[in-house]
Amino acid sequence: MPKANKMKYYAVRNGREGAKVYTTWEEAKENVSRYPGAVHKSFTSQTEAQRWLNVAAPLQRTYLEGPPKDWTPPPPQDPAAGPSRRSKSFNGQPNPGTAMNIPADSFLGNLPPALPQQPPEPKVALSSEQRAVLDMVQQGRSVFFTGSAGTGKSVLLREIIKFCTEHSGKRPAVTAATGIASVNIGGCTLHSWAGIGLGKEDAKVLVGKLLGKHKQLLKKDKEKGRQAEDDMDWYDETGTEKNSWSVNRWREVKTLIIDEISMIDGNLFDKLEYIARILRRNKAPFGGIQLVLSGDFCQLPPVPDRMNGVSKDIRFAFDAHSWEDCVGRPVILTHVFRQKDQAFVDMLNEMRFGRLSPKTITEFRKLSRDVEYDDGIEPTDLFPTRREVDNANDYRLANLSDPRHEYKARDVPGYDDNNAPISEKKMEAMLDRLIAPKAVTLKVIFHPFAPNIQLTYIRKQVGAQVMLIKNLIQGELVNGSVGRVVAFSKVKDAINGGALVAHDQGVSGGGSSLPIPGGSMMAGGSTSSGDRNKDQGKIPEHILLSNDVWPVVKFQKGLMVVCIPTAFEQTNAIGTMEAMREQVPLILAWALSIHKSQGQTLERVRVDLGRIFEKGQAYVALSRATSMQALQVLKFDPGKVMAHPRVLEWTRQVTAKRGVIEDDMEFETNLDDDLEFWADYL
C-alpha cells in the first residue's frame, strides 16, 4: 500500500506578508522568493510551525548605562601600553558588573507589513563609453570591460544587471570572485553559482561531480589505462538528483556576470568554459552563454595556488586558452569620475602600470606632509593585512574613554540551492567573509556637563571613527562614507531631533536641524534633507518603539544619521538567502585593509608604502583617494609600485591588432570527442 504524503506547513518568519503559516509551498515561495532577509521553515504540524514563529532570537545589545551625574572622563590611555587585546568570541553575555544585556524586540516575529512601493531611484547618467558597453549587452554580445580605478565600472555593472533583469524577464547569474564583491552587487560567488566547490579538480572530474557520474568516469579511465583516484569520500549515490539544481542553472542561464575577473585564475576560467559546453551540449564558446566580465588586472591578482607549501605561478583569466574566443578584445573605460584633478589622474595611471616619471615620484614624495581636518574626522589608514587593521582600530578605540556600546549581530542560516538547511558552522564561515562584523564596539566621549547624555550633540565631541558599509543616498551616503559617532540615541528621540535613520530600504526622517549648539544638520546649513528623503522608507516598528539606543554618526558632508541594524545577505546560486547577518551598517574606520577598500571611494586616505608587499597593492590603496589634497603617503618608494609583468605584456598585446587564434580547430575537435564521451550522461 503506498505511503500517504504527510501534510506540511510552511512557517515564514520574515516575508512579504510578515510572519505567517502557509499550507502550500507555492504560497510560501511567493512570499519569500527574492525577499531580502527571508526566513522560513517547513513542519509536519501547524502547532510546531506556529511555535517556531513565536520563538524569536533577539539581536543583542550590550552597553553601559549612561555615566552618573558626577561622572568625569578618565585620562586617556598611555600609548606605550600598546593596542588592546582583540576579543575572539562573542557569546552575547554582558561583562559582569559593567554592562547589561538589553534585547531588542523580536526581529523575526510580529514583523510590520510589507513596505509600500518606493519612489524610483534617480536615473544614472552614463558616459558615452559606459553607454557603448550597455549597448553591446543589449545586443546579446559578450563583453569584458575594464579601466583604471574610478572609471565607473561598478555603476555600469549595476545598470547592466538592472537592464538584464527588467528586459529579459529573468535575472542574470550575478557572480563575483570574492564574497565581499558578490554582496556589493547582490549576487553570489562564482564558485557557488557553478556548483564546483573549490574547483581544484580536473574539468572532467568537475563535470562528473555535477552529473553524479564519477564512478562511471573512473571506470572509463580504468579501461583506457589511466590511474583511478582512491578518494571516494565525496561521492553520493544520489548525486544526480543532488546536483540537478547546478546542472539546470548551467543549462538555463542566458547571461553570466562575473565581477572582479582579475581575481579569477585562468585555469578555473578554462574549466568553467569546458563545463558550460558539455552541460549545455553546445560547441559555442562558453556553451553559448552571454558573458559580462568586469575588473582591472592592474589591481589585486588571483590568490596563487600552493603545492607542497610553494606558491604556483599566477595564471590570469586572460591567459585561459578560451579567453579570446569567449570575450574578444576588452572595452577600456577611460573617463575617470573619482578624481577631478587631471594631474592626479595621470600620476595614478603611471602608477597603475608601474612606470613612474621623475616628476611623478617627486610629487608623490611631497604627499608625506600631515593633513589637518577641523571636523575631527581623520584619514583612514590603509594596511595590507587584517592584523595591522585590527591592531590599529583596537588601539584607537581603547584610547577613548568608556562608556562603550557593543552591538552583536544576529546571524540566521538559510538554505542552499538544493533547499537543504545551512549548518551553523557553514553559516559562520560564510558570514565571517562579509564586511559586516560579528560584533561592533563603539564609544563616544560625552561632555561632562551634559544634562541628558543620550540627546545632547556637542560639536567638539569625538567618538569612534566609523565607515558606512551600505549604499543609502547616491552621492552622499554610500558604502565607504566615513564619520564619527557623536552620540547614542533611541530612534524616536533621534527623529524628534531631526536625524535621518538608516535602514534596509534607505533613509527616513530628517528635519531641518539637530540640536547642535551653533550648528545645523547639514555642514553648509542646508535644510533640504527632509524633502529629499521624504517617504524613502519605513522604519521597522519594533525598532521605532524600542528603548534600545543606536549610534548617531556625523558624516563628512555634515549629515547626522542614526544607524539601526540592516541585513547583509549571502545568497545562493538561485538567488535565495543562504545566510544572513543583521548588524548596524558600520565598521571602525581609523584603519581598513587594502583588500576591503577595493572598489570604494575614500575622501581622506593615509598609506604607508613601507608595508606594501603585493603587486598592485600600492595602486589600489592610493587610487581610493579623490584628491591629492586629502591623501597622505608615507615612505614613498618607487620600488614598491609594482605592476605584474604578465599584465603589462597582455596590455601591449590587446592594444595591437587582434591576431588569429591558431588552435581554434583543435579546440572544436576536442569538444566533439568529449561530447561523445559524456553522451550517456547528458
Image (cartoon, rainbow, N blue to C red):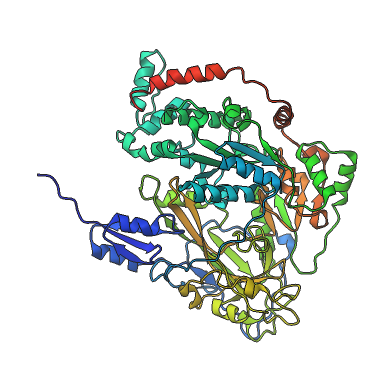
Position in image of residue 397 (x %, y %): 66, 64
Query: Is 49 situated left or right of 229 in this image?
Result: left
Q: Residue at x 72, y 66 (%)?
A: 556
Residue 505 appearing in the image: yes
Residue 309 appearing in the image: no
Position in image of residue 90 (x %, y %): 50, 60
Would you identify the image quadrant in which residue 457 lies? bottom right
- 313 over 512 or under it: above or below: above
- 534 over 633 or under it: above or below: below
Query: Is 462 situated left or right of 203 in this image?
Result: right
Quadrant where the C terminus is found in the figure: top left
Position in image of residue 312 (x %, y %): 61, 28
Q: Residue at x 59, y 60 (%)?
A: 470
Name the residue at the left extreme. Answer: 1
* Front position in the image: 583 or 338: 338
- 61 over 547 or under it: above or below: above
Q: Residue at x 47, y 25 (%)?
A: 283
Query: Is 380 situated left or right of 218 in this image?
Result: right
Q: Residue at x 66, y 35 (%)?
A: 330
Q: How many marks?
A: 0
Position in image of residue 413 (x %, y %): 41, 55
Would you identify the image quadrant in which residue 224 lies? top left
* Front position in the image: 470 or 230: 470
Quadrant where the N terminus is found in the figure: top left
